[in-house]
Image (cartoon, grey):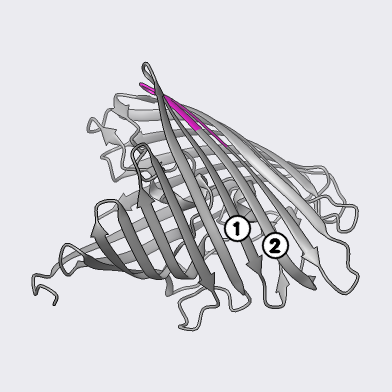
């Protein structure tokens, strides 16, 4: 029988972006702005074992449909080491994907993240061991209009992570795998690490007759005092029927970062980023990232993109910050077979309340 002691926690977040574009092909405007996220979430705790979370986004950005449900899950926690989830949630694949965007070094995830969908509707089991963690979930089509793709199909997804400590050096190594049976078609495309304008350098278009998808991911993180390095590699293999050739794409990124007058916090237990510890109005950080996405294949060549990003973040509090990014995106070639260089200068005001 459930205890009747119920508690609630209501939170919201807003992010406003402004971008300047310098495009040698003239496909982007000179500048653009938009509300990247405007989310409201409600966490409900029924007792020590049962809790739930619901979150919707009302930003209507180029990435998010207005009013879409970002998360809607029920959690059962029999003890501190094991958790069961039912509903819509982040699938356990990739450090870049499972970590909340409000804790990221840059305004947008790397272009390599386009090789894995973030959200799914299904069941997920999480186990926390001593210095390691494991997640495994089964996800399917969205039958409840929660915002997931109706063409998703079924997917078995798992992620494993391990913490290693050597003197003052803390390491985290992880691996992910997903086997997916899509319903009818798939598509791989990415914005150039900027979300104020809906124009892409790489886009495969719709790919038909895909029988199955195998996804592999490797991740590594190093932390020592104010320094952080983070890297990932993701590979996809699309097995196709009707005598159609198989496809293989891959991507990855590398980040190096240093924080001043603060502390970047990483949950080694969960394998994801947590809120930054700051000194009010005195904390800032600098970061650099290299990322790439390779959609070249002898059967379907959709282009190759490399990005170099520089970022400066200034923290008012642990929840509110200003972000400044410079991104140089180079497609050699883009999906139309044309070499394209895009320079982006952008800023974000992030507010959580």
Q: Position of residue 150 (x, y in %)?
A: 59, 79
Q: Position of residue 178 (x, y in %)?
A: 60, 58
147, 198: nearer the viewer: 147
Magenta stretch, residue numbers: 221-231
Reply yes or no: does residue 94 show up in magenta: no
Which numbered circle lies on residue 164? Answer: none
Cβ atoms at labels 1 and 2 below 8 Å apart: yes
Element under disc 1: strand
Quadrant occupied by the N terminus: bottom left
Quadrant occupied by the C terminus: bottom left
Which numbered circle lies on residue 178? Answer: 1
Residue behind mark 2 = 213
Q: In this view, does 316 lie above or below 298?
A: above
Main SS category, magenta section: strand
Q: In this view, does 248 lie above or below 218?
A: below
How many neighbours does mark 1 have within 10 angstroms: few (below 14), some (14-19), or many (20 or more)? many
Could you give the CA–CA distance between mark 1 and mark 2, rounded to whole angstroms?
8 Å
Q: Where is residue 345 in the image (x, y as percent from the top left)?
A: 57, 40
Q: Position of residue 145 (x, y in %)?
A: 47, 82
Q: Which is more N-terminal, label 2 or label 1?
A: 1
Q: Is residue 5 above or below residue 311?
A: below
307, 346: nearer the viewer: 307
Give the residue drawn at x 16%, y 62%. Answer: 48
Answer with left or right where residue 229 lies relative to residue 53. right
How many neighbours does mark 2 have within 10 angstroms: few (below 14), some (14-19), or many (20 or more)? many
Q: How many labels does the image show?
A: 2
Element under disc 2: strand
Name of the residue lying farthest toward the top: 167
The answer to whether residue 56 is seen in the rendering is no
């Amino acid at each position: 029988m459930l205890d009747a002691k119920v508690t609630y926690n209501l939170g919201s977040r807003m992010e406003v972006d402004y971008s300047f574009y310098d495009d040698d092909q003239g496909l982007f405007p000179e500048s653009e702005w938009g509300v990247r996220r405007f989310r409201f979430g409600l966490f409900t705790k029924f007792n020590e074992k049962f809790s739930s979370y619901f979150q919707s986004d009302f930003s209507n950005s180029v990435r998010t449909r207005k009013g879409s449900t970002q998360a809607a899950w029920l959690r059962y926690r029999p003890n501190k080491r094991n958790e069961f989830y039912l509903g819509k949630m982040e699938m356990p694949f990739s450090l870049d994907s499972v970590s909340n965007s409000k804790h990221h070094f840059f305004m947008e995830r790397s272009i390599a993240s386009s090789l894995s969908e973030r959200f799914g509707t299904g069941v997920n089991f999480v186990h926390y061991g001593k210095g390691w963690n494991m997640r495994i979930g089964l996800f399917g089509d969205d039958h409840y209009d929660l915002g997931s793709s109706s063409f998703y199909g079924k997917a078995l997804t798992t992620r494993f992570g391990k913490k290693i400590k050597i003197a003052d050096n803390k390491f985290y190594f992880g691996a992910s795998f997903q086997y997916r049976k899509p319903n009818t078609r798939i598509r791989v495309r990415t914005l150039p690490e900027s979300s104020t304008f809906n124009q892409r350098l790489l886009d495969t278009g719709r790919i038909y007759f895909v029988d199955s998808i195998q996804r592999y991911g490797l991740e590594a993180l190093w932390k020592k005092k104010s320094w952080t390095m983070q890297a990932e590699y993701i590979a996809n293999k699309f097995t196709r029927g009707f005598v159609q050739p198989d496809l293989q794409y891959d991507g990855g990124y590398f980040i190096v970062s240093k924080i001043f007058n603060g502390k970047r916090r990483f949950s080694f237990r969960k394998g994801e980023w947590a809120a930054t510890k700051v000194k009010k109005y005195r904390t800032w950080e600098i970061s650099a990232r290299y990322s790439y996405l390779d959609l070249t294949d002898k059967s379907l060549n959709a282009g190759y993109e490399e990005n170099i990003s520089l970022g400066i973040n200034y923290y008012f509090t642990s929840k509110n910050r200003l972000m400044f990014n410079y991104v140089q995106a180079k497609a050699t070639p883009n999906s139309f077979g044309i070499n394209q260089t895009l320079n982006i200068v952008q800023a974000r005001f992030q507010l959580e309340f």
